[in-house]
């Protein structure tokens, strides 16, 4: 059993990303962004799940836009190019399956 604290870490900083847990089969990463902050186009080599805890974030994949809130879970396949922009102050959990 593992218990992971996921505290608010932005403070004076802008975007904050931290690997909270790294296991042989998956990584858990917490990402926090203030409103209008962006992460430019990139991809993950692994299948990924995104769970928004608070806020609202827009993902753009292949010119298709998806706005996520805490009412959805978003799955991306390996190598899907995407970017994201916080529409509100956002705290999300990213799970990468290895």
Image (cartoon, grey):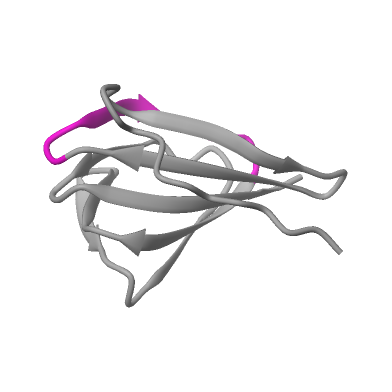
Residue that appears at 19% across and 53% down: 65
- Magenta span has 48? no
94 relative to 32, above or below: below
Tell me the quadrant of the picture where the C terminus can be found. Answer: top right
Q: Inspect this view and state whether residue 43 appears.
A: no
Spot the residue most to the bottom: 71
The quadrant holding residue 67 is: bottom left
Q: Position of residue 97 (x, y in %)?
A: 71, 50
The quadrant holding residue 29 is: top right
59 relative to 3, above or below: above
Write the start and end of the magenta stretch as one range.
35-46
Horizontal side of residue 3 vs 9, given as left or right: right
82 relative to 65, above or below: above
Residue that appears at 30% across and 29% down: 39
Tell me the quadrant of the picture where the N terminus can be found. Answer: bottom right
55 relative to 86, above or below: below
Q: Position of residue 83 (x, y in %)?
A: 30, 36
Residue that appears at 67% across and 53% down: 4
* Residue 94 vs residue 4, the one in the foreground: 4
- Magenta span has 43? yes
Q: Inspect this view and state whether residue 6 appears.
A: yes
Residue that appears at 20% across and 38% down: 34
The quadrant holding residue 68 is: bottom left
């Amino acid at each position: 059993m593992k218990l992971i604290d996921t505290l608010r870490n932005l403070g004076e900083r802008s975007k904050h990303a931290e690997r909270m847990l790294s296991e042989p089969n998956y990584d858990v990463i917490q990402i926090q962004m203030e409103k209008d902050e962006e992460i430019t186009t990139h991809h993950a080599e692994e299948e990924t799940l995104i769970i928004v805890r608070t806020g609202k974030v827009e993902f753009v994949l292949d010119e298709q836009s998806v706005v996520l809130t805490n009412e959805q879970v978003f799955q991306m396949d390996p190598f899907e190019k995407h970017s994201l922009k916080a529409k509100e102050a956002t705290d999300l959990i990213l799970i990468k399956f290895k």
